[in-house]
Image (cartoon, rainbow, N blue to C red):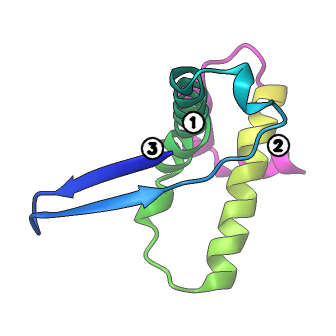
Amino acid sequence: MRSEVYIKKTATTTKETRFYLSSLEPKERTPAQWHQLIRGHWAGVEIRNHWRRDHLWREDGSRTNNVNALANLALLRNALLTLTPVHYPDVPLKEIMELLHSDPAAGLRVIR
């Protein structure tokens, strides 16, 4: 996939080529279908993972440069994102976040 990005601030254009692997044969999809498949995959990743990690856990707002602290916090966030739906099956994510915010020990109970 080839992409071109114009950066207003520097008035420069960058071009990139990305390669993707698939178990499908190239002829099984049209170029437009491949494009839609790739874009859909990354959109799903953004919605399911990155948005939740940043918006809910404020991951991008971390001020530490300590690699070990960042790795440990990422592990805790991953565990909570995976386990909270199991422990609170019919509770909306926003309510779960309010619960964990008001009772941080609840998050540790979920992981334990």
Magenta segment: 88-112
Residue located 66% across and 21% down the image? 29
SS for dot 2: helix
Q: CA distance from mark 3 to mark 1?
A: 11 Å
Does residue 88 sit above or below 84 in this rendering?
A: above
**CB-based contact (under 8 Å), mark 3 and mark 2:** no
Q: Residue furthest top?
A: 90
Q: Which badge, 3 or 1, is on the more N-terminal residue?
A: 3
The disc labelled 1 sits on which kind of residue?
Met
> In the figure, is residue 22 to the left or right of 6?
right
Mark 3 or mark 2: whose residue is earlier in sequence: 3
Q: Is residue 47 magenta?
A: no
Which of 103/3 is in front? 3
Q: Are marks 3 and 1 in contact (CB under 8 Å)?
A: no
Residue 105 seen in this snapshot:
no
The residue singled out by tag 2 in the image is 110
- Tell me which numbered mark, 2 or 1, is placed earlier along the sequence: 1
Q: Kindly identify the amino acid type of the residue bearing the numbered disc 3.
A: His
Please tell me how crowded label 2 is: few (under 14), some (14-19), or many (20+) other residues with Cα within 10 Å.
some
Q: Image height check: is 103 above or below 86? A: below
Question: Is residue 72 depicted above or below 18 in this figure?
Answer: below
Q: Which mark is residue 46?
A: none
Q: Residue at x 65, y 50 (%)?
A: 104
- 2 and 1 marks in contact (CB < 8 Å): no
**Which residue is identified by label 1?**
97
Between residues 79 and 30, which one lies in front from this camera angle? 30
Near-viewer residue (36 or 77): 36
Residue 55 got which mark? 3
Provide residue 31's location: percent of width, then percent of height. 54, 27
